[in-house]
Image (cartoon, coloured by chain):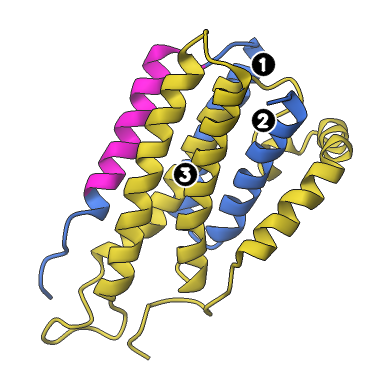
Amino acid sequence: MRAHGFGDPRRSTGARIVTSALSLMLFAPILLVLLGLTGCGQTATGALTSSSSAAQIEYAMQSDFLGLQEVAKKYNQLPRCTAPNAPTICSDLAVVTEIRKADDAAVLAFKAAQKIVNDKSSSASALSKALGDAGVAVEALQAILLRYGLK
Amino acid sequence: MDPITAVTLGLTILDGVEKAIAAGEDAMGIVAQGRAILQKMQDEKRDPTADELVALNALTGAEQAAINTDPPAP
């Protein structure tokens, strides 16, 4: 198959994200306690705890986002499937275009979030919106990578 | 945003990223480095420094530039 490279395509729907978020909201306090007790926070979820600041959360999200960018970069660097003598594992320009759009949006969202988080006069609602927008942007890129089975 | 909601959002994102890149060793290495710095911040009970943010933004920008650059023809 010449399509999109590696792995089995998987679906990531908005509904799954919402369900997952709701589940985490319900179980986050328990999860945080368990992570603290087992000392496995570093591996499973980074170092976020209930006392993490907005700046730490923004940093955690953005540094994890780098991992998604690395996956996206590797896919983009594959020869295009439409190129003459393209290898079996190649990149589809339509997918790359989707990735670029989502990546650009996420980078902008992080710039905005960092500005608001670092402004000590920012309101709680502004912080909430900024971190939420960054989260949505990360999930959009993640959904594309999952949809096409890119790793 | 109350702390639990904010942390929940962060956890959701981190968990999702981990699942998305589970098989990508280079990507996991990058994530592990970021989490190590975050752990240090947590241990020292401080926010990211200006230098740490500059470094993070530089990495994000470099990845963005690479994503927006077409590959050479085979």
Instruction: Give neighbour class at mark 2: few <14, some 14-19, many 20+ (Cα, 10 Å).
Output: many
* Residue B55, image x, y percentages: 35, 25
Give the spatial CA distance, label 3 vs label 2: 15 Å
Q: Chain of mark 3?
A: A
Residue denoted by label 3? A65
Instruction: Report whether B36 appears left or right of A87.
Output: right
Q: Amino acid at mark 2?
A: Ala
- Res A3 label: none
Check the image and report above or below for A144 versus A125: below
Q: Is residue A20 magenta?
A: no
- Confirm or deny contact between disc 3 and disc 2 (CB under 8 A): no
Q: Residue at x 87, y 38 (%)?
A: A34
Give chain A's shade. yellow
Report, in whole angstroms, how far the alpha carbon at label 2 lies from the one at label 1: 9 Å
- Residue drawn at (60%, 67%), measured in percent from left and top? A13
Secondary element under disc 1, as helix, strand or loop, is helix
Instruction: Identify the residue at the far top of this view.
Output: A121
Please give the letter of the chain rendered in blue: B
Labels 3, 2: front one: 3
Q: Position of residue A16 (x, y in %)?
A: 68, 63
* Mark 1 lies on residue: B43
Residue at (48% x, 36% y) in the render? A63
Front one among A111 and A35:
A111
Please tell me in which quadrant of the rendered image residue A89 appears. bottom left
Front in this rendered view, residue B31 or A121: A121
